[in-house]
Image (tube, rainbow, N blue to C red):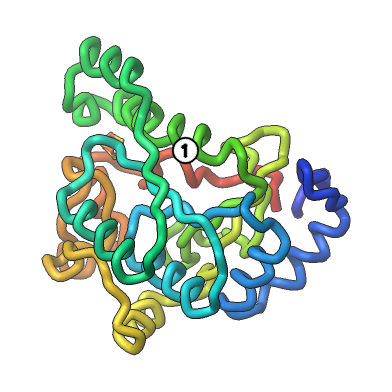
Amino acid sequence: MMDALPVLPDSGAPGADLLEWARSLELQSAEAILAAASRRFGDRLAVVTSFQDTGSVILDIAHRNHLPIRVITLDTGRLPEETHIQIDRVRERYGIEVEIVVPDSLQVEELVRERGPNLFRVSPEHRFACCNVRKVQPFRRAVADLDAWIAGLRREQGASRRAIRTVEVDRSNRPDGSLIKIHPLADWTSEQVWQYIDEHRVPYHPLYDRGYRSIGCAPCTRAARPGEPVRAARWWWEEGAKECGLHLVQVGSR
Ligand code: SF4
């Protein structure tokens, strides 16, 4: 169940309207979902992407449908060089501006001074501290002027994502319920994603050609091994949910 219906700031849209809108999109195509989101939220909407396969598909669909959706990415300071190459490819291919958000330098300095540059290997608590400073806090700053953001999550990607809805209230990133999260590819399979990329000659992240299936920071991502789940190659030394904190399950938001 989606919980107490939020009133979206500055949009004048009441919560009941939002619930109806969310339900109306649940079985729609990605094109229709993106178009409806763009109409509803205008420049208070952005795709937040790390330029993985689903993000590439979303950007291509938005471009083909002339949807003026902002594009935001987080440069954690630990990204592989190939991600920067991909950012440049996207800027050139679509002629769009990519809003690159970086962590607070004082927070990073304090973190690595106290816990070391590779603290994420020490314990899950240290790993979450790194993700918090390099990803979660910059993300929350980046979406401060947004009513809604778009992510490339798919239900097929693992247990932690199996229950996602097309439209959710993102209370983990804004507890007052005024931030909406949209998953236009929620029901896509990996095969559909790559069929789209092939058919439309979408520029994709170079690491996919080196065996990667999920891509994040360089020290926390490796190529996939045969038969392992999609996100097993992220923080592979840890057990449990392979999430950085941006996509925590939204208790009570659906
Ligand atoms: Fe730090 Fe790794 Fe998280 Fe990147 S993925 S923010 S390097 S712990």
- Based on the displayed image, in which of its 4 quarters is residue 134 positioned? top left
Kind of element beneath mark 1: helix
Q: Residues within 10 Å of mark 1 (few under 14, many from 20)?
A: many
**Residue drawn 55% across and 46% down?**
249
| Image-quarter location of ligand 1 | top left
- Based on the displayed image, in which of its 4 quarters is residue 238 positioned? top left
Image height of 242 relative to 87, above or below = above
Image height of 204 relative to 17, above or below = below
Image coords of residue 53 (percent x, y):
33, 67
- Mark 1 Cβ inside 8 Å of ligand 1: no
Q: Which residue is mark 1?
A: 139
Q: Is residue 65 left or right of residue 77?
A: right
Q: Residue furthest left?
A: 210
Image coords of residue 34 (percent x, y):
59, 69
Using the rendered image of the protein, determine whether residue 116 is visible from the camera's viewpoint: yes
Label count reads 1
Decide which of 236, 245 is in the foreground and name it. Answer: 245
Q: Residue furthest front?
A: 95
Q: Is residue 33 left or right of residue 69?
A: right
**Residue drawn 38% across and 83% down?**
196
- Based on the displayed image, in which of its 4 quarters is residue 165 positioned? bottom right
Decide which of 100, 156 is in the foreground and name it. Answer: 100
